[in-house]
Amino acid sequence: MYRPLGITVSRHIMDLQRMHPEATGDLSGLFNELIVAAKTISAEVNMAGLADVLGMSGKTNIQGEEVQKLDEFSNNTIKKRMARCGYVCVMTSEEEDDIIPVSEGYEGKYTLAFDPLDGSSNIDVNVSIGTIFSIHRRKSDDGEPSFGRRSTDSGDEWQSAGDEGGSAEDLLQKGNRQVAAGYIIYGSSTMLVFTTGEGVHGFTLDPSVGEFYLSHPDIKIPGKSKYFSVNEGNYTYWDENMRCYIDYLKEQDLEGGRPYSSRYIGSLVADFHRNLISGGIFLYPKDNKNPAKPSGKLRLLYEAAPLAFVVEQAGGRAITGDGRDILEIEPQELHQRVPLIIGCRYDVDEAEDFLSGKR
Protein backbone atom coordinates (compact mmCIF):
# COMPACT_ATOMS: atom_id res chain seq x y z
CA MET A 1 0.00 0.00 0.00
CA TYR A 2 1.30 3.45 -0.92
CA ARG A 3 1.92 5.77 2.01
CA PRO A 4 2.84 9.42 1.48
CA LEU A 5 6.09 10.58 3.02
CA GLY A 6 5.57 12.34 6.32
CA ILE A 7 7.52 13.85 9.19
CA THR A 8 8.70 11.16 11.57
CA VAL A 9 9.00 11.79 15.28
CA SER A 10 12.79 11.34 15.03
CA ARG A 11 13.00 14.05 12.39
CA HIS A 12 10.72 16.32 14.42
CA ILE A 13 12.93 15.90 17.49
CA MET A 14 16.05 16.68 15.44
CA ASP A 15 14.33 19.77 13.99
CA LEU A 16 13.61 20.96 17.52
CA GLN A 17 17.24 20.37 18.46
CA ARG A 18 18.48 22.39 15.48
CA MET A 19 16.46 25.35 16.73
CA HIS A 20 18.78 25.37 19.76
CA PRO A 21 22.42 25.40 18.58
CA GLU A 22 23.55 25.15 22.20
CA ALA A 23 21.73 21.82 22.67
CA THR A 24 23.80 18.75 23.49
CA GLY A 25 21.35 16.21 22.05
CA ASP A 26 20.83 14.41 25.36
CA LEU A 27 17.11 15.14 25.48
CA SER A 28 16.78 13.97 21.88
CA GLY A 29 18.51 10.73 22.83
CA LEU A 30 16.27 10.28 25.85
CA PHE A 31 13.17 10.68 23.70
CA ASN A 32 14.40 8.15 21.17
CA GLU A 33 14.97 5.55 23.89
CA LEU A 34 11.56 6.24 25.40
CA ILE A 35 9.94 5.84 21.98
CA VAL A 36 11.51 2.39 21.59
CA ALA A 37 10.02 1.39 24.95
CA ALA A 38 6.63 2.72 23.79
CA LYS A 39 6.76 0.66 20.60
CA THR A 40 7.56 -2.45 22.64
CA ILE A 41 4.62 -1.82 24.98
CA SER A 42 2.32 -1.06 22.05
CA ALA A 43 3.16 -4.38 20.41
CA GLU A 44 2.44 -6.25 23.64
CA VAL A 45 -0.83 -4.39 24.23
CA ASN A 46 -2.01 -5.22 20.72
CA MET A 47 -1.26 -8.90 21.33
CA ALA A 48 -2.71 -8.97 24.83
CA GLY A 49 -5.79 -10.98 23.94
CA LEU A 50 -3.67 -13.65 22.25
CA ALA A 51 -0.82 -13.86 24.76
CA ASP A 52 -0.63 -14.67 28.44
CA VAL A 53 -0.55 -11.03 29.53
CA LEU A 54 -4.12 -10.39 30.61
CA GLY A 55 -5.23 -10.57 34.21
CA MET A 56 -3.59 -9.92 37.56
CA SER A 57 0.09 -10.51 38.27
CA GLY A 58 -0.58 -11.39 41.91
CA LYS A 59 1.33 -8.33 43.15
CA THR A 60 0.16 -5.13 44.85
CA ASN A 61 1.75 -1.73 44.14
CA ILE A 62 2.54 1.15 46.49
CA GLN A 63 -1.00 2.48 45.98
CA GLY A 64 -2.47 -0.74 47.37
CA GLU A 65 -3.80 -1.64 43.93
CA GLU A 66 -3.53 -5.06 42.32
CA VAL A 67 -0.98 -5.04 39.51
CA GLN A 68 -2.02 -6.21 36.08
CA LYS A 69 0.39 -8.37 34.08
CA LEU A 70 0.58 -5.74 31.33
CA ASP A 71 1.21 -3.08 33.97
CA GLU A 72 4.18 -5.05 35.25
CA PHE A 73 5.45 -5.69 31.71
CA SER A 74 5.23 -1.98 30.84
CA ASN A 75 6.96 -0.93 34.03
CA ASN A 76 9.84 -3.36 33.48
CA THR A 77 10.17 -2.41 29.81
CA ILE A 78 10.65 1.28 30.59
CA LYS A 79 12.96 0.61 33.54
CA LYS A 80 15.27 -1.68 31.60
CA ARG A 81 15.32 0.54 28.52
CA MET A 82 16.10 3.74 30.37
CA ALA A 83 18.47 2.38 33.06
CA ARG A 84 21.40 2.18 30.62
CA CYS A 85 20.49 4.86 28.09
CA GLY A 86 22.98 7.35 29.54
CA TYR A 87 20.57 10.28 29.66
CA VAL A 88 18.76 9.69 32.96
CA CYS A 89 20.16 9.92 36.50
CA VAL A 90 17.14 8.58 38.39
CA MET A 91 13.59 7.41 37.72
CA THR A 92 10.37 6.92 39.61
CA SER A 93 7.30 4.92 38.66
CA GLU A 94 3.76 4.82 39.94
CA GLU A 95 4.32 1.09 40.44
CA GLU A 96 7.46 1.39 42.59
CA ASP A 97 7.76 2.20 46.29
CA ASP A 98 10.99 4.17 46.00
CA ILE A 99 13.23 5.80 43.43
CA ILE A 100 14.62 3.68 40.60
CA PRO A 101 18.39 4.09 40.23
CA VAL A 102 20.07 3.80 36.84
CA SER A 103 22.98 1.50 36.08
CA GLU A 104 26.31 2.66 37.45
CA GLY A 105 28.32 4.51 34.84
CA TYR A 106 25.22 5.46 32.82
CA GLU A 107 24.10 8.49 34.84
CA GLY A 108 22.72 11.39 32.82
CA LYS A 109 21.35 14.84 33.60
CA TYR A 110 17.61 14.19 33.38
CA THR A 111 15.02 12.57 35.61
CA LEU A 112 12.08 10.49 34.45
CA ALA A 113 8.77 10.00 36.26
CA PHE A 114 6.25 7.72 34.59
CA ASP A 115 2.95 5.91 34.90
CA PRO A 116 3.76 2.80 32.86
CA LEU A 117 0.17 1.92 31.99
CA ASP A 118 -2.50 4.36 33.06
CA GLY A 119 -6.02 2.91 33.03
CA SER A 120 -4.74 -0.61 33.63
CA SER A 121 -7.96 -1.60 35.39
CA ASN A 122 -9.57 -1.41 31.94
CA ILE A 123 -7.09 -3.71 30.22
CA ASP A 124 -9.33 -6.76 30.28
CA VAL A 125 -12.22 -4.90 28.60
CA ASN A 126 -10.15 -3.42 25.76
CA VAL A 127 -10.49 0.26 26.71
CA SER A 128 -7.75 2.67 25.60
CA ILE A 129 -4.85 2.85 28.04
CA GLY A 130 -1.58 4.72 28.00
CA THR A 131 1.88 5.60 29.30
CA ILE A 132 2.37 9.05 30.86
CA PHE A 133 5.84 10.55 31.34
CA SER A 134 7.48 13.62 32.84
CA ILE A 135 11.08 14.80 32.37
CA HIS A 136 13.02 17.27 34.53
CA ARG A 137 16.65 18.30 34.69
CA ARG A 138 18.32 17.04 37.80
CA LYS A 139 18.77 19.73 40.42
CA SER A 140 22.51 19.09 40.46
CA ASP A 141 22.80 19.68 36.70
CA ASP A 142 25.18 22.42 35.64
CA GLY A 143 22.41 24.15 33.72
CA GLU A 144 23.73 23.24 30.27
CA PRO A 145 20.75 23.82 27.98
CA SER A 146 18.98 21.38 25.73
CA PHE A 147 16.02 22.05 23.49
CA GLY A 148 12.87 22.71 25.48
CA ARG A 149 11.74 25.10 28.17
CA ARG A 150 14.02 25.98 31.04
CA SER A 151 12.97 27.64 34.28
CA THR A 152 14.83 30.74 35.39
CA ASP A 153 13.40 30.86 38.90
CA SER A 154 15.72 32.77 41.20
CA GLY A 155 17.12 30.99 44.20
CA ASP A 156 17.80 27.66 42.49
CA GLU A 157 21.33 26.34 42.85
CA TRP A 158 22.77 24.40 39.94
CA GLN A 159 25.89 22.36 40.56
CA SER A 160 27.96 19.98 38.50
CA ALA A 161 26.28 16.61 38.16
CA GLY A 162 29.49 14.62 37.89
CA ASP A 163 28.99 10.87 37.61
CA GLU A 164 26.70 10.43 40.60
CA GLY A 165 23.22 8.98 40.45
CA GLY A 166 20.19 11.12 41.17
CA SER A 167 18.04 11.23 44.30
CA ALA A 168 14.43 11.75 45.29
CA GLU A 169 15.20 15.47 45.59
CA ASP A 170 15.93 15.57 41.86
CA LEU A 171 12.48 14.11 41.17
CA LEU A 172 10.53 16.30 43.59
CA GLN A 173 10.33 19.40 41.43
CA LYS A 174 7.43 21.62 40.42
CA GLY A 175 5.60 20.90 37.21
CA ASN A 176 6.60 24.29 35.83
CA ARG A 177 10.19 23.06 35.77
CA GLN A 178 9.47 20.18 33.40
CA VAL A 179 11.52 20.23 30.20
CA ALA A 180 9.22 17.72 28.51
CA ALA A 181 6.09 15.69 29.20
CA GLY A 182 3.52 13.67 27.34
CA TYR A 183 1.83 10.35 26.90
CA ILE A 184 1.47 7.39 24.57
CA ILE A 185 -2.09 6.19 24.15
CA TYR A 186 -2.76 2.62 23.01
CA GLY A 187 -6.16 2.47 21.35
CA SER A 188 -7.49 1.93 17.83
CA SER A 189 -4.11 3.39 16.90
CA THR A 190 -1.05 4.15 19.01
CA MET A 191 -0.35 7.86 19.42
CA LEU A 192 2.50 9.76 21.03
CA VAL A 193 1.61 13.26 22.23
CA PHE A 194 4.25 15.45 23.85
CA THR A 195 5.55 18.94 24.50
CA THR A 196 8.96 20.40 25.21
CA GLY A 197 7.51 23.76 26.10
CA GLU A 198 7.13 24.83 22.48
CA GLY A 199 3.65 23.60 21.59
CA VAL A 200 2.03 20.18 21.58
CA HIS A 201 2.38 17.69 18.74
CA GLY A 202 0.83 14.28 18.13
CA PHE A 203 2.37 11.36 16.24
CA THR A 204 0.59 8.20 15.12
CA LEU A 205 2.39 4.87 14.89
CA ASP A 206 2.38 3.18 11.49
CA PRO A 207 2.74 -0.47 12.55
CA SER A 208 3.72 -1.59 9.05
CA VAL A 209 7.02 0.30 9.26
CA GLY A 210 7.28 0.73 13.02
CA GLU A 211 7.52 4.51 12.90
CA PHE A 212 5.61 7.40 14.45
CA TYR A 213 4.49 10.02 11.92
CA LEU A 214 3.33 13.56 12.67
CA SER A 215 -0.47 13.42 12.45
CA HIS A 216 -1.58 16.23 14.79
CA PRO A 217 0.77 19.24 14.50
CA ASP A 218 0.49 22.11 16.98
CA ILE A 219 -2.51 20.79 18.91
CA LYS A 220 -4.73 23.47 20.42
CA ILE A 221 -7.51 22.57 22.82
CA PRO A 222 -10.75 24.49 22.13
CA GLY A 223 -11.25 27.53 24.34
CA LYS A 224 -14.68 26.32 25.49
CA SER A 225 -16.39 22.97 25.20
CA LYS A 226 -19.71 21.21 25.65
CA TYR A 227 -18.41 18.03 27.31
CA PHE A 228 -17.47 17.10 30.85
CA SER A 229 -15.73 13.97 32.13
CA VAL A 230 -16.30 12.98 35.76
CA ASN A 231 -17.27 9.91 37.76
CA GLU A 232 -20.76 10.92 38.87
CA GLY A 233 -20.91 7.79 41.01
CA ASN A 234 -18.97 9.84 43.57
CA TYR A 235 -21.57 12.64 43.57
CA THR A 236 -22.67 12.07 47.18
CA TYR A 237 -19.05 12.19 48.37
CA TRP A 238 -18.29 15.62 46.88
CA ASP A 239 -18.61 18.92 48.71
CA GLU A 240 -21.55 21.19 47.96
CA ASN A 241 -19.66 23.47 45.58
CA MET A 242 -18.62 20.56 43.38
CA ARG A 243 -22.16 19.18 43.28
CA CYS A 244 -23.49 22.62 42.35
CA TYR A 245 -21.04 22.88 39.47
CA ILE A 246 -22.02 19.52 37.97
CA ASP A 247 -25.71 20.37 38.41
CA TYR A 248 -25.04 23.66 36.62
CA LEU A 249 -23.45 21.84 33.65
CA LYS A 250 -26.57 19.69 33.30
CA GLU A 251 -29.05 22.57 33.42
CA GLN A 252 -30.75 23.67 30.22
CA ASP A 253 -29.47 27.00 28.96
CA LEU A 254 -29.36 27.03 25.18
CA GLU A 255 -27.82 30.49 25.01
CA GLY A 256 -25.02 29.42 27.38
CA GLY A 257 -24.43 26.15 25.56
CA ARG A 258 -25.83 23.92 28.29
CA PRO A 259 -26.54 21.22 29.14
CA TYR A 260 -23.10 19.75 28.58
CA SER A 261 -22.82 16.14 27.44
CA SER A 262 -21.13 13.63 29.72
CA ARG A 263 -18.19 11.68 28.29
CA TYR A 264 -16.44 9.57 30.94
CA ILE A 265 -14.28 6.59 30.00
CA GLY A 266 -12.67 5.90 33.36
CA SER A 267 -9.13 5.86 31.94
CA LEU A 268 -7.44 9.20 32.62
CA VAL A 269 -5.20 9.18 29.57
CA ALA A 270 -8.15 8.28 27.31
CA ASP A 271 -10.45 10.92 28.82
CA PHE A 272 -7.71 13.54 28.64
CA HIS A 273 -6.80 12.72 25.04
CA ARG A 274 -10.41 12.98 23.91
CA ASN A 275 -10.82 16.35 25.63
CA LEU A 276 -7.51 17.65 24.28
CA ILE A 277 -8.55 16.92 20.70
CA SER A 278 -12.31 17.61 20.85
CA GLY A 279 -12.61 19.89 23.87
CA GLY A 280 -13.85 19.17 27.35
CA ILE A 281 -13.15 19.36 31.05
CA PHE A 282 -12.01 16.41 33.17
CA LEU A 283 -12.61 16.46 36.92
CA TYR A 284 -11.37 14.17 39.67
CA PRO A 285 -11.97 16.35 42.75
CA LYS A 286 -11.22 15.49 46.34
CA ASP A 287 -14.02 13.66 48.13
CA ASN A 288 -14.79 12.04 51.48
CA LYS A 289 -15.24 8.54 50.08
CA ASN A 290 -11.86 7.28 51.26
CA PRO A 291 -10.44 8.88 54.43
CA ALA A 292 -7.02 7.50 53.47
CA LYS A 293 -7.00 9.66 50.33
CA PRO A 294 -8.30 13.06 51.50
CA SER A 295 -6.31 14.95 48.87
CA GLY A 296 -7.71 13.14 45.86
CA LYS A 297 -6.83 10.03 43.90
CA LEU A 298 -4.51 11.04 41.07
CA ARG A 299 -0.74 11.21 41.47
CA LEU A 300 0.99 14.57 41.05
CA LEU A 301 4.27 13.40 39.53
CA TYR A 302 2.98 10.66 37.24
CA GLU A 303 -0.39 11.98 36.06
CA ALA A 304 -1.41 15.51 37.07
CA ALA A 305 1.80 17.48 36.44
CA PRO A 306 2.74 16.01 33.02
CA LEU A 307 -0.81 16.34 31.67
CA ALA A 308 -1.03 19.87 33.10
CA PHE A 309 2.13 20.80 31.18
CA VAL A 310 0.64 19.38 27.99
CA VAL A 311 -2.74 21.07 28.36
CA GLU A 312 -1.27 24.48 29.20
CA GLN A 313 0.99 24.30 26.17
CA ALA A 314 -2.15 23.55 24.13
CA GLY A 315 -3.96 26.60 25.53
CA GLY A 316 -5.86 24.94 28.37
CA ARG A 317 -5.50 24.97 32.13
CA ALA A 318 -5.12 22.58 35.09
CA ILE A 319 -5.97 23.28 38.75
CA THR A 320 -6.68 21.42 41.97
CA GLY A 321 -9.92 23.25 42.73
CA ASP A 322 -8.67 24.48 46.09
CA GLY A 323 -6.86 27.57 44.86
CA ARG A 324 -3.74 26.02 43.32
CA ASP A 325 -2.49 25.59 39.78
CA ILE A 326 -1.13 22.07 39.27
CA LEU A 327 2.17 23.28 37.81
CA GLU A 328 2.86 25.46 40.85
CA ILE A 329 2.70 22.66 43.43
CA GLU A 330 5.97 21.73 45.14
CA PRO A 331 5.93 17.92 45.52
CA GLN A 332 6.59 16.63 49.02
CA GLU A 333 6.70 12.92 48.27
CA LEU A 334 6.97 10.62 45.28
CA HIS A 335 3.40 9.36 45.45
CA GLN A 336 1.66 12.57 46.45
CA ARG A 337 -1.99 12.73 45.39
CA VAL A 338 -3.89 15.81 44.26
CA PRO A 339 -7.38 16.70 42.98
CA LEU A 340 -7.37 17.45 39.26
CA ILE A 341 -9.56 19.72 37.14
CA ILE A 342 -8.11 19.98 33.65
CA GLY A 343 -9.24 20.97 30.17
CA CYS A 344 -10.51 23.97 28.20
CA ARG A 345 -9.52 27.25 29.82
CA TYR A 346 -13.03 28.75 29.90
CA ASP A 347 -14.47 25.65 31.54
CA VAL A 348 -11.67 25.31 34.10
CA ASP A 349 -12.00 29.01 35.00
CA GLU A 350 -15.74 28.53 35.45
CA ALA A 351 -15.23 25.43 37.58
CA GLU A 352 -12.76 27.36 39.71
CA ASP A 353 -15.37 30.03 40.38
CA PHE A 354 -17.83 27.40 41.60
CA LEU A 355 -15.30 25.50 43.70
CA SER A 356 -14.06 28.68 45.36
CA GLY A 357 -17.62 29.69 46.27
CA LYS A 358 -17.75 32.70 43.93
CA ARG A 359 -20.83 31.31 42.17
Image (cartoon, rainbow, N blue to C red):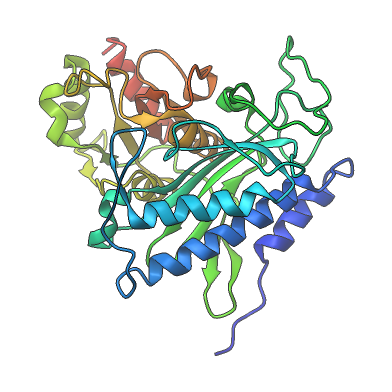
Instruction: Determine whether, in the image, residue 25 is placed left or right of residue 261.
Output: right
Query: In the image shown, does 149 or 33 lie closer to the viewer?
Result: 33
Instruction: Specify the farthest residue to the bottom.
Output: 1
Query: In the image shown, does 160 or 135 lie closer to the viewer?
Result: 160
Q: Residue at x 56, y 58 (%)?
A: 37
The answer to whether 175 is drawn above or below residue 2 in the figure is above
For the N terminus, the image quarter is bottom right
For the C terminus, the image quarter is top left
In the rendering, at what x and y percent does residue 172 appear? Answer: 57, 23
Instruction: Specify the farthest residue to the left.
Output: 236
Q: Quadrant of residue 245?
A: top left
Asked whether residue 31 appears in the rendered view, the answer is yes
In the rendering, at what x and y percent does residue 195 appear? Answer: 61, 44
Q: Residue at x 34, y 46 (%)?
A: 271
In the rendering, at what x and y percent does residue 253 appear? Answer: 18, 33
In the rendering, at what x and y percent does residue 249 appear? Answer: 21, 32
Query: In the image shown, does 242 or 123 lie closer to the viewer?
Result: 123
